[in-house]
Amino acid sequence: MFNWFSQVFSITRFSLTSLPQRMGSSAAALFGIAGVVAVMVAVLSIAQGVVSTMRNTGSADTVIIMRGGSDSEMTSGLGGEEARLISEAEGVLAGDKGPMASSELFVIINLPLKSTGTDANVPLRGVDQAAFEIRDGFEIVDGRAFREGLKEVIVGIGAHQEYAGLEVGSSLLIGQEQWPVVGTFRSGGGLPESEIWADSKVIQDAFRRGNSYQSVHARLVSPDSFTAYKDALTSDPRLNVKVQLESEYYQSQSEVLYNLITGLGTAIAVIMGLGAIFGALNTMYTAVSSRTREIATLRALGFKSGPVIISVLTESLLLALVGGLVGAGLAWLVFDGFRAATLNFASFSAITFAFDVNAQLLSQGIIFAMLIGLIGGLFPALRAARTPVAHALREQ
C-alpha cells in the first residue's frame, strides 16, 4: 500500500513539474473554465440580488391588506371607507398621529434609464405620512419629506441612481404638471428604494382615482397579533380583503423573476460548461499524448495504472480549481454590489437591486469548475492507463 501511494506521489509530481512545457494549452483550459464560472456567478447573482431586495422589505409585524383574490397591488382596489376600517381595526399599533397604517396607491410612470436612455416602468406610490414609520429603516438621506397636500415627490435611493432627472431640486412631469423632487430616501435596502413616493390624496386627484386605494400597509402591535387581526378583517361582512405579512407578499412577488433568472443562468452555464469540458479534454489529451512514452516507461518499470489515472486527474482538477478561483474572484470584484434595474413581472414595474455575489454562489462556481475538470480529465486519464505499453513505447 505504501508503494502504491509512493507511485501516486511520484507520477503526480512529475506531471505537475512538466506543466510549464504545456503552458499554452493549459492556460487556454484554465481561462476557459474561469470565463464559465465568472458568467455563471454573475448571472445567478442577479437572482440573489432580487431576492435580497425582497427579503429586506417588510418585517414580522408589518402587513399588507388588498382586495380579496388579488395577487398584487396592481389588481387590487379598496374604497376609502374600507381603508378606514382596516386602519382602525384592533391590532394596529397606535402612533403619535393615529394608527400606524398607510392607505396607498400604486401607479406606473415612464422614466429614462441613465445607462441607456430607454424608458422604464417606474413605480409611483401614493402614501400617507404613517408610511415613513411603517417601513423599516426609512430615512431621508438628502433634502426633506414631501408635505401633505402638495405636488411633491421623494425618490428611493435605488431609483435615484438608475433613472435620469430625479436629483433633488429637479422636477418630474406627472400628468400635465411638474412635481418638484424634494428628497431622497433609503429603506434598509428594500423594495421601496426602487419607488417614487408622493402624498396619496394628491395622487388620487392627479390620476382621477376618487376616494379609492389599492392597499393598506400597517404595523401591528406585535407579530403575535397577526392571526387575530387577519381573522377580524376577513370575518367582517363589510370587507372583502386578503391579509398577508409584507415579507411573505414580497417573497411571493420575487418567485417568478428568481426562477426565470436562475433557469436562464443555469442553462447558460451548462452550455458554456460543455465548451469548457471539450477544452479541458483537448488539453488533457494533448498532455497525455506528449507524455505517452514517458508514461509507458513508468508502467514498464512497474508503476500501476491507478497512479497514472490519479496523476492525470490531479492535473486536470488543479487547472479547474485555479480557473474556478480566478472566475469566482473576477465575478466578485466586478459584480458584487453593482446596481441595476429589471422588470418585476408581478407588478410590471422596474425594481432596482444590487448584484449579490455571496459565499454560496462562489462555492457553487468553484464546485462547477471542479466538475468540468473531473469530466475533462477522466477520459484522457483512462486512455493513458489503458494504452498497451509496447504500443506506447513505439510512439514518437
Image (cartoon, helix red, strand yellow):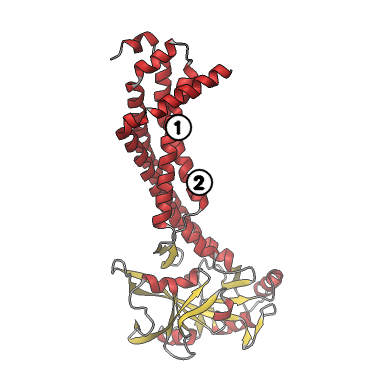
Residue 191: percent from left, percent from top: 49, 69
In the picture of the structure, the residue carrying the numbered disc 2 is 363
Residue 54 at x, y = what percent?
Answer: 52, 64
Seen in the image, is 143 located left or right of residue 101? left
Front-most of residues 8 and 29: 8
Is 11 in front, or is 205?
Answer: 11
Q: Which residue is mark 1?
A: 374
Number of other residues with Cα within 10 Å of mark 1, as a class: few under 14, some 14 to 19, many 20 or more: many
Identify the residue at image location x=44%, y=64%. Answer: 353
Please state which amino acid type lies under the numbered disc 1: Leu
Q: Position of residue 167 (x, y in %)?
A: 37, 80
Could you give the CA–CA distance between mark 2 and mark 1, rounded to whole angstroms?
Answer: 16 Å
- Residue occupying the point 47% across, 91% down: 149
* Circle on res. 243: none
Q: Earlier in the sequence, mark 2 or mark 1?
A: 2
Q: Kindly give the residue lying farthest to the bottom in the view shown.
A: 149
Q: Residue at x 40, y 41 (%)?
A: 323
Label 1 sits on a secondary structure element that is helix
Q: Which residue appears farthest toward the top when viewing the image? A: 390
Circle 2 crowding by C-alpha within 10 Å: few under 14, some 14–19, many from 20? some
Place residue 28 in its image quadrant.
top left
